[in-house]
Amino acid sequence: MSDVVKIGLVSISDRASGGIYEDKGIPALQDWLNKALTTPWEPVTRLIADDQPTIEATLIELCDVAGCHLVLTTGGTGPALRDVTPEATLAVAHKVMPGFGEQMRQVSLAFVPTAILSRQVAVIRGSSLIINLPGQPKAIAETLEGLKDADGNPKVHGIFASVPYCVDLIGGPYIETHDAVVKAFRPKSAIRPKA
């Protein structure tokens, strides 16, 4: 297995994919991952429309062909008619991981009451974890990182604290993080000694 972790980054937006405005989702994901990961990683990016068959085909390709052990989507998770990212994600799933969506809404509710309108899900397909993230760059960072107090200690855990161990459990590569950004949590028995 390669030491470089492949991470799929999918921005789902009719307008951005149509060139009407600049996509901000993929750059926000890349910036956050560059800040958070100590493990070498390689982005595999896709900018696509809010179209369920296209989203499904993209997720399958990233997991089954491109070999991404983690796929992060941004956009298309609200109640609008064209928001079909959760439906597409569930359609390609082998297992559903409801805790991720529950925790993302928990984090977002600390900032906006409309967090209850978000329908993000997370699933496992083979040995890949797929997570739907919000569409706004600020909300992406908040849900991944969580809420911290004035001393930098977590008040509400972000979802990324659980991602590396989940990837371990499904047979993916060992992912390590910068503790100051987000501390990856693993049981003591699953922690590898630092090189």
Image: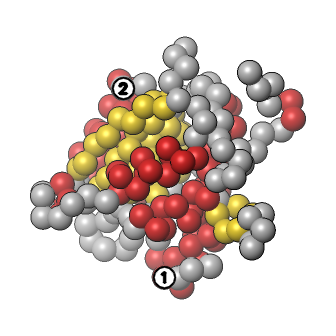
Q: Is residue 108 visible?
A: yes
Name the amino acid, label 2.
Answer: Ala
Q: Residue furthest top?
A: 1
Q: Quadrant of residue 176?
A: top right
Q: Which mark is residue 114?
A: 1
Question: Upstream in the sequence, badge 1 or badge 2?
Answer: 2
Q: Is residue 95 visible?
A: no
| Pointer 2 residue | 66
Q: Position of residue 35 (x, y in %)?
A: 54, 48
Q: Nearer the viewer, residue 142 or 167?
A: 142
**Residue under the point 39% across and 36% down:** 43
CA–CA distance in space, label 1 to label 2: 35 Å
| Residue 56 as seen in the image, left or right of residue 20 | right
**Residue under the point 29% across and 55% down:** 12
Q: Quadrant of the C terminus?
A: top right
Q: Position of residue 46 (x, y in %)?
A: 28, 43
| Residue 129 as seen in the image, left or right of residue 178 | left
Q: Which mark is residue 22?
A: none
Q: Residue furthest left?
A: 19
How crowded pointer 1 is (Cα within 10 Å; few <14, some 14-19, many 20+) is rated as few
Q: For the image shown, how many numbered marks are present on the structure?
A: 2
Q: Secondary structure at mark 1?
A: helix
- Position of residue 172 relative to residue 155, above or below, is above
Q: Quadrant of the N terminus?
A: top right
- Position of residue 68 relative to residue 47, above or below, is above
| Residue 95 as seen in the image, left or right of residue 92 | right
